[in-house]
Amino acid sequence: MTTASTIPISTESEAPWQLPYRGTVGMVCLIIAEAAIFAIFFVSYIFYIGKSLSGPTPREVLELPIFGTICLLSSSITVHWAVAALRKDNIRSCALGLASTVLLGGIFMVSTAEEWYHLIYEKGLTIRTNLFGTTYYSLVGLHATHVIVGLILLSIALFTALTGRIKEEHSEKLEVVSLYWHFVDAIWVGVFLVVYVIGR
């Protein structure tokens, strides 16, 4: 007498493992390298806090850049929205999300430029004034450079969206750009805490 087996046998084959998108891998590697560079600048800034032999000091000249910070961090939401829209082949919403991201990033850069103008021409703080000036402009300037690069990439993506050259199949490439932008925003959180909170 034979008995039927009661062990369930799955007839569905597992989905084959696929290599991650090479653009994503490349961006992750770049972000790791850039994060290491920023870590060096953070440590340097913290090490030299309070060691300037002359003024002005951070407490005397720095103000919390609340508005610029809100704009930059909000841009992470809009770039995520743009990528999500492109995955659904909603080009119009994608373009709107990219335009919003570029606008918010541009506002942040304008606020940074206004802060630097105030520090240089009204407070007399330059990169050569003291250790504070040297470390401040090095760290904040490094971040501003990354913001500019991100804005260039996002502006190119926005142009392709407005001209109808971007399609759903380009969503992975746009996600790579968004990863860079999220990194820039995350680094600003560190800059804000180190320079404007701990450093004051």
Image (cartoon, helix red, strand yellow):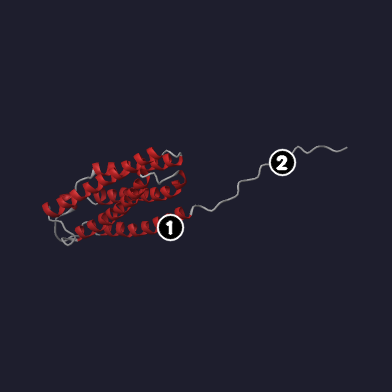
Horizontally, residue 116 falls left or right of residue 7, namely left
Q: Nearer the viewer, residue 152 or 187?
A: 152
Q: Nearer the viewer, residue 87 or 11?
A: 87
Kind of residue indicated by mark 2: Ile
Instruction: Give residue 93's quadrant in the image.
Output: top left
Mark 2 vs 1: CB contact within 8 A: no
Residue closest to the far right: 1
Kind of residue indicated by mark 1: Cys
Task: Report the residue marked by disc 2.
Answer: 9
Instruction: Residue 28 in the image: state x and y as whole percent.
Output: 43, 54
Q: Which of marks 1 and 2 precedes in the sequence?
A: 2
Instruction: Residue 10 in the image: state x and y as whole percent.
Output: 69, 41
Horizontally, residue 57 falls left or right of residue 101, namely left
* Label 1 Cα crowd, 10 Å radius (few <14 / some 14-19 / many 20+): few
Which secondary structure, mark 2? Answer: loop
Instruction: Residue 4 in the image: state x and y as whole percent.
Output: 80, 37
Task: Report the residue marked by disc 1.
Answer: 29
Q: Nearer the viewer, residue 90 or 81?
A: 90
Instruction: Residue 94 in the image: state x and y as whole percent.
Output: 38, 40
